[in-house]
Amino acid sequence: MRKARVTVPAVCTNLGPGIESLGLALGLHVSAAFVERSDSTLLIETHGEGGADLPADCYHPVMYAAVRVFQQVEDSPLGLRLDVRNAIPLNIGLGAEEAMTVAGLIGANNLMGMPLTRDDLIALGAEILGRADGLVAAMLGGLTIAARAESGAVFRRIDVAPLKVLVVAPQLEHYDPEDMPLPETVAYTDAVGNIGRAELVVEALRSGDFGLLSQVLADQVLDPYLGEHIPGYREAVEAALKNGALGVTISGHGPALLIFAAANHYRIADAVQSVFDSRDILSRVWTLLVDTQGVVVTAAEMHPE
C-alpha cells in the first residue's frame, strides 16, 4: 500500500506592505496522511480546526488539490483514506486554505511516485487558489517573495533571523473578505510607499533589524481598508505599540492581527485582547515561531482499516 504524510505550516500573506508578494510561514500546522486502499472507497476524516465544517468528499480542500494532481498525471489510487489533523483556524487570515491545498498537492504527488516537479505543483496550486504567494510560503517555509510573470509564478525564499510573532484573532461572526470589494484604484504615493517599504521589510527580517522593521511594516493600501471592518482595530494597534510591539499588520485578509515584538509578548497580547473585550468581542491568541522548514513529508502511520 502506498502512503505518505505531509505537514504544512500556516502562512501570513500580504505581509505588511508586501501585498500579494511577501509571505511568512508560521508555526501552526496541518498534517494530512494518505493511505491507498485496496477497494474503491474514499474515506476522509478531519480532526481539529474545521473538523465539523469541512466536507468529507472531493470538495475537502486537501482532497480537491489531490484530485487535481491525479487528473494532471492521469492516474490515481483505486481507493484512498485521508486523515487530516489541522491546527490552523479557518477563515481568519492564517492561510488554512493555502496550507491544505499544498498538503493535497504534495501528498498526492508523493503517493503517485512524484511525477510532477515543484514548479508544476506551484503552477497547479496557483490555478486552484488564483495566486501563488501563500502556497509558495507554505511550501518553502521562512520568508518568501512571489510575483506573476508571463512564464507563471516566480519566487524566492529568504532566510530570516530567529523570530517569534504574536497573532491575535478577534472572532467576528460577519467578517467576510469576499464581501469586501477591494478598491479599484490607489493613490500613487501610497503605492510607491508600499513598494519601497516592502523591500526594506525583507531586509529587516533577513538581518533581524527590528528597528528597521518598526519603521517599514506599515501598509497604506490594504490594511486601512480591511481595518475599517474590524471593530477596535485602530485601538488594538495603538495598544500593541504602547506595550512594546514593533509593528502590527493584518494577516492575509484578516481579521487576525500579526504583531512583531522582541519581548513582552504576553503583555502585548493582554493589552490587545482587552481592547476587543471592551467591545464584547472574543479573541484567540498564539505566540508562534517562524516556520523555516515548510513542507515536511514522512511515511504515514495510521490505524488499521
Image (cartoon, grey):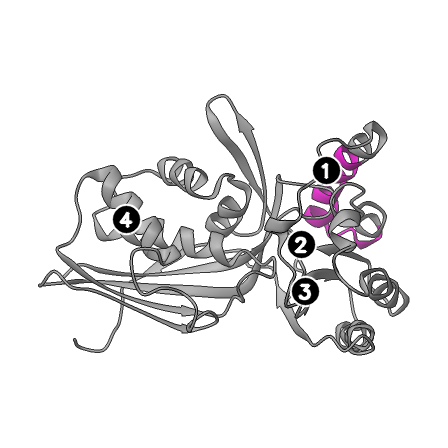
Please check the rendered image and state whether residue 217 is part of the magenta-colored stretch, yes or no: no
Kindly identify which numbered label has been placed on residue 249: none
Label 3: how many Cα within 10 Å (few below 14, some 14–19, many 20+): some
Q: Mark 4 points at which residue?
A: 67
Mark 4, secondary structure of its residue:
helix
Q: Distance between the residues labelled 2 and 1?
A: 34 Å
Mark 1, secondary structure of its residue:
loop
Kindly identify which numbered label has been placed on residue 183: 1
Q: How far apart are marks 3 and 4 (CA)?
A: 36 Å
Q: How far apart are marks 1 and 3 (CA)?
A: 32 Å
Mark 2, secondary structure of its residue:
loop
Foreground of the two, 160 or 97: 97
Q: Mark 2 points at which residue?
A: 161
In the rendered image, residue 61, in percent from the top left (x then y), is placed at 39, 56
For the point 78% across and 51% down, the residue is 209
Q: Is residue 216 left or right of residue 202?
A: right
Q: Which of marks 3 and 4 is in front?
A: 4
- The magenta stretch is 194-211
In the rendered image, residue 219, in percent from the top left (x then y), is placed at 78, 45
Compared with 56, 48 (above or below) is below
Q: In this view, does 141 lie to the left or right of 281?
A: left
Q: Earlier in the sequence, mark 2 or mark 4?
A: 4
Q: Nearer the viewer, mark 2 or mark 4?
A: 4
